[in-house]
Structures are given as C-alpha cells and as structure tokens.
Amino acid sequence: MTPSPTAGLLQAARDLGPLLRRHAAEGDRQRELPRDVVDALGSAGIFRMWVPRSLGGAELDYPGGLEVLEELARHDGAAAWVVFVAATGAPLLSRLSDEALEQVLGDPSAIVCGSLHPPGRATPVPGGHRLQGRWSYVSGCGHASWLALSALVEGGAAGPHLFLVPARQAQVLDTWHTGGLRGTGSHDVTVADVFVPTGWHFAMAPGATRSRHHQGPLYRLPAYGFLGTPVAAVALGLARTALDALVEMATAKVPVGRTGALREQQTAQVAVARAQAQVASARAWLFQLASQLWDDVQHGRPVPADAAAQLMLASSHAAWSAAAAVDQVQKTAGASAVYSANPIERAFRDIHAVTQHRRVAEVSFETVGRTLLGLEAGDPVLKL
C-alpha cells in the first residue's frame, strides 16, 4: 500500500536523521547548512511539503507538516529551521500571480527564503516597482533561489507588500555570528534598485484573493499557522533531543562524589519527569488546536475568529515550555553538557535562539493577553 504523503515525509525525516546529526557540527562551523544536507532535504521533497499539488508539491496536511519539522529538529535544529522558512513560503505566497507561482514553485529545485523585517522601500515605476533595502534574519539565504522580502510602497496604501526577487540579485552580508541556530545562515541581505514586475508582489492584507493553485483547505488557515506554530514545532523537537540525550547519559554517568549512576539519583528522576511533563503537555495542546483547525478547514467550516490568537498562545507556551525543559535537562546533566560533542549543549544554545523569534517571544503573551481582555491585539499578523 502506498504511504500517505504525511507518513512518507515523516519517514523521510526520520531516515535523514543520521545524516543531519553527522553534519550538524559542520553546519555550526560554517554558519550555514552543508550542501549535502540541503541536497538531501531537497531530494526528499521536504522543502516542498506545503507546495500545492498542482505545482508538484506534497500539499501536506497542516499537523503532518508540524510533525515533520519536530522530527527534523530532533536531529538538527538548524536544518529544521531552514525547512520551516523555506516550506512556509509556499502558502504565504498564495497571493502572487499564477505566472509567478508557476515559475517559482513549479521548479522542483527552487528554495524560497525571505524576511518580513525590517521592511524595505518599493518605488512604483511602469510595469512594476523598484525595490531596495536591507533585511535581517534571512535564514537559508546562501542556498536560496528566490527571496521574499517585505517593503513599504512609496505613495501607496499603508502596510507592507511582499516582493519576490531572484536571490542572485541580492547581496548576502556576513552578519550571522551567533550562539544558537548557527547553521541556519540567517545573514542580512541587501537589494539595490531591483525591478520587480507587476504580479510578483502583493499587499499583506486580510481578504486578498488566493491563486488558482491555492484553493485547498491548507491555504485557508490563518497566516500565523505558518509563521509561528512551526517555530514551536522546532522547539519541541529540540527539547526531545535534550531529554533523549539525558536519559541515555544517565545510564552510564556516575556523578562526582556519588557511587551510583545518574539515573539512580532522586534529583535526576524528578528532573526528567518534570521536563517530560512540560514538553508532552505543551505539545498536546498545540497539536490539539492544530488538528481541530485542520478539521475545520477540511470540512468547510469557518475558521474561528480567535484561531490565530489561540495558535499564538499555544505556540509561545510550547516554545517556552520546551526551553524550560531543556534548561532543567542541562542543569541535571552537569558539566558533561558543556561539551560541544554533547547534543544537550547544542539544544541548549539553539532553543534559546528559537525563543527570541518574534512569533513566540515574550511579547506574544502580551498580544494574546490583550485579546483575552477585550482589547485590540496590536499585531496585524493575527488578521492575515
């Protein structure tokens, strides 16, 4: 029997685990994903998991895509992060013209990366716009074919537009010198007076018409589902990495001054149980919401008005719960966890970079709290 797209891609992510782990340290050193990793992810179709079927993609179900990201992060957080950025381009570009989508997403080798902040500047000219600016945190830009970049249109309506430009027309600046997620290659990029034709950009505003390729239920989800919830999926995978590593270590490690293995110490037993509870409960809530929302759109039910805010809250809670679990694991592992060869060390660095992402950062709780108290959220992404 032919496996479902979800089962097939999830198994592909598991199969890639040894390769990802083997190259993770190399990615840290060179501050971008190794070419072998990018090629393997591309060959498996993982970058294209949310590309419409009409354009040759998997159009994977929403919870299934989150599971794929979580599984990848168990092996290499940087690889999972770049996949998150590249895969979410497909649903977020649904307002482009059919011609642009067919040229970009119809290419099985294309990788789309980008940044929404800070916005650049677009000047209207006959037939399109001239784009210029500098954007930060462009994960995967060294391997990208296309860049999706936000900009404010001079003399146009308020609010940013998203412009798609060939990556070769941008300059990558070597800015990504970080502690966590080093392998993502999230450098700054600049674009200087590049012409973007009409049809290759769109206003980031609610209610815009989707392309003929984006009519399936996947593309009726709130934009936050692709901007924030995948961040939480990566965090959950990193927490699982740390927990698994501690369980394995606890069997053999005898702490200084003790006669028994770490797993025989009460402090370790309590720490593992609490960390497991934090991760499992946060994951359950996140996937409950994701599955319910997916069921709604599959059956043509209206998306609840508070769906995006609920996803934001569950995503932020999952990311910070995962980080708290990794902190507990790192303390319990002791000095062994400071060595770069220990998976806990990279998980600790990576997850604290994850929690600084705008979509799950501390400010997200304030945003949702405002909605719960009957105030305007103040975050336009919740309306997309």
Image (cartoon, helix red, strand yellow):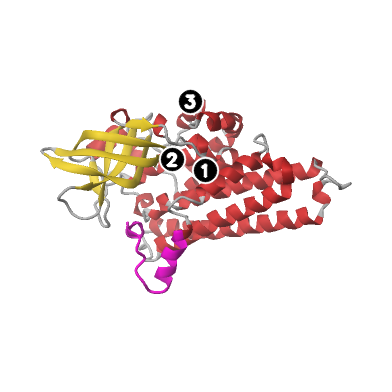
Which mark is first along the chain, 2 or 1? 2
Query: What is the crowding at mark 1: few (fewer than 14 residues within 10 Å), some, or many (at least 20)?
Result: many
Name the one closer to the observer, 298 or 70.
70
Which mark is first along the chain, 1 or 3? 3
Could you say where residue 17 lies in the image, as x and y percent from the top left? 59, 34
> Mark 2 and mark 1 in contact (Cβ < 8 Å)?
yes
- The residue segment tinted magenta is 363-384
Name the one closer to the observer, 210 or 173.
173
The Cα atoms of the two marked residues, 3 and 1, are separated by 20 Å
Picture layout, residue 227 above or below residue 98: below
Disc 2 target residue: 49
Type of amino acid under label 3: Arg
Which mark is first along the chain, 2 or 3? 3
Quarter of the figure that contains the C terminus:
bottom left
Q: Which mark is residue 131?
A: none
Picture layout, residue 266 above or below residue 186: below
The Cα atoms of the two marked residues, 1 and 2, are separated by 9 Å
Could you say where residue 134 lies in the image, as x and y percent from the top left? 31, 39
Considering the whole magenta stretch, tell me its main secondary structure: helix
Residue, x 50% and y 43% (percent of image)? 6
Answer whether residue 291 is visible to the viewer in this image: no
Type of amino acid under label 1: Val
Disc 3 target residue: 35
SS at mark 1?
helix
Name the one closer to the observer, 4 or 120.
120
SS at mark 3?
helix
